[in-house]
Each structure stands twice: as C-alpha cells, then as structure tokens.
Image (cartoon, rainbow, N blue to C red):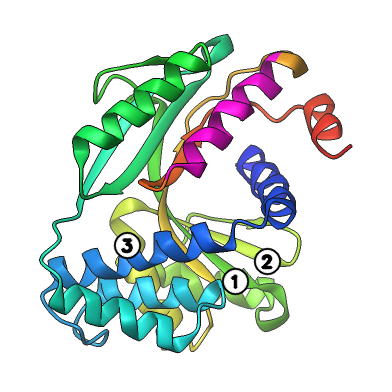
Amino acid sequence: MSGHSKWSKIKRKKGALDNKRSNMFSRVVKEIIVAVKEGGSNDPELNSRLRLAIANAKGINMPKDNIQRAISKAEKDNVNIQEVTFEGYGVGGVAVFIECLTDNNMRTVANLRSIFNKRNGSMGTNGSLSFLFERKGVFSIKKEIANLPQLELELIDGGLEDIEDDGDHWLVYTPLEEFSNMQKKLEELKIEVENAELKRIPNNYKQVDVDTAKTFLGMIDAFEDDEDVQRVYHNLEMTDELEAALNE
C-alpha cells in the first residue's frame, strides 16, 4: 500500500498550499448530518457513525460550536442528503471513483459529467469500476502516542491487516468487516485517532507519463472542489519521477 501513503503525503502538502480548510469543514458537517439522520440519535455514545464523524471533525480542528451546530441542523432541518457514487476514467485510462453527499442528485450528476467531459475523461456506469478498488478501514494515529511493536500486538484483536509509516502518523488498515471492531479496540486502548474512514484502496495502479499525470490530477482537483464531493479515489501510480515533479 506504499502508493497510497505517497499520495497522502502529497495531498497534505497540496492541501496546505490550497487552503481548503473550509471545504474540509463543509464535508465533515455533511457527514455529521447524515450520521444523525441515519443513526437515529444525536448521542455519539449510541450512534457509532456520529461518534466517528465527530472524531474526524476534531481531527481537522473543527471548533466544538461548529460540531454542535451541525448536530442541531440535522435535528431541525428536513433536508434530504443522500449518498451517491460515480465512476469513470481520466486521461491515460486512469480509473476514478467518487463518493458524494448531495441534496440534489441531478445537479451533482451534471457537475461531475461536465468535469469528466472538459478534462477528456469519461463517466462510466455504477459498478463498472468497483472491482478495481477494495474498501478498507484506515485509521490515522500520531506516532508520538503509539509504540509500533506494542501497537501491532494490541491491535491484532481489532482485525489489524497492515500498518504503514506515513511520516508523522501510523496508518492502520483493517478489512471492511473489521472496521467497527478496530474502532472499538482503539477506544478501549484510549488511543486518539486523528482520522478514521472507509477508503477505497486500488487493487492495481496505472502508470502514465508526467504530463498526462498532471492533466489527470487537474481533473481530480476539479472534482475535489465540487461542494457535493466527499472523497475521490484513483489508481494513478505515484512514480519517483511524478513525485519529484509534484514536489517542485
């Protein structure tokens, strides 16, 4: 999974430069709203999805007042936010999988199709690319609060599959079906998690030249700027040449 780790480092650097903090807050607010509505409770102790959303909100330093307003909004508003996904290909045949939370599916479809078309990509039918990605639980833990050998031993019972070095953090991977078990195990151990989510990890990667990769990543940026998009996954291979070019 080293390719995934490289991408996360590049993404952090780029995110800091682009100052996308407000977009991050907006996405977490939607997660909180959906968690309250689907979980049927505003109590994080009784609603595991809400507990996870709040933990992720704290991970990006969202103020407590903002979190509480999001919970109150979910209780009072009748807005219907639905989860939808989209799949397709970018230039060079690189696969893209997009997760959205939207209150207007027609708007979201139109916006994403426009981005695909303008960036020489193509939107596919749902399910056409799902075989290229595997859903896994990914938990980000600060190294300063976790000794790796001890951590590995402790987390075996939580369904640990792999641990990856991501610079200042350990990335803990679990199979999809073990996500909840790992969440409970980390809480039991009182290990603070900066971020936890179900991610789509590529089963294989597509290598293209640097210019094609940069064009493709321009499309990814456009998707991530859309207000309805929560997460974008792709299987572009991070080569040493591309990493050097992106770090220039």
Residue 156 in the image: state x and y as whole percent.
Answer: 46, 68
The nearer-to-camera label among 3 and 1 is 3
Report the Cα–Cα distance between label 3 and label 1. 24 Å
Q: Helix, strand, or loop for circle 2?
A: strand
Instruction: Write the start and end of the magenta stretch as one range.
Output: 212-226
**Near-viewer residue (25 or 47):** 25
Please give the label number shown on residue 30. Answer: 3
The answer to whether residue 236 of the structure is visible from this angle is no
User: In the drawing, does residue 155 fall left or right of residue 101?
Assistant: right
The answer to whether residue 168 of the structure is visible from this angle is yes
Q: Helix, strand, or loop for circle 1?
A: strand
Q: Amino acid at mark 3?
A: Lys
Q: Is residue 213 magenta?
A: yes
Quadrant housing the N terminus: top right
Quadrant housing the C terminus: top right
Residue 61 in the image: state x and y as whole percent.
Answer: 56, 78
The structure residue drawn at horizontal position 42% and vertical position 62%, both measured from the top left corner, is: 26
Please, is residue 136 above or below residue 21 in the view?
Answer: above
Q: Is residue 229 magenta?
A: no
Q: Amino acid at mark 1?
A: Ile
Number of marks drawn? 3
Report the Cα–Cα distance between label 2 and label 3. 26 Å
Q: Helix, strand, or loop for circle 3?
A: helix
Cβ atoms at labels 1 and 2 below 8 Å apart: yes
Q: Residues within 10 Å of mark 1 (few under 14, many from 20)?
A: many
Task: Please report whichever mark, 3 or 1, sits nearer to the chain's N-terminal start.
Answer: 3
Q: Which residue is mark 1?
A: 141
Q: Amino acid at mark 2?
A: His
Report the Cα–Cα distance between label 1 and label 2. 5 Å
The nearer-to-camera label among 2 and 3 is 3
Please give the label number shown on residue 169. Answer: 2
Please give the label number shown on residue 160. Answer: none
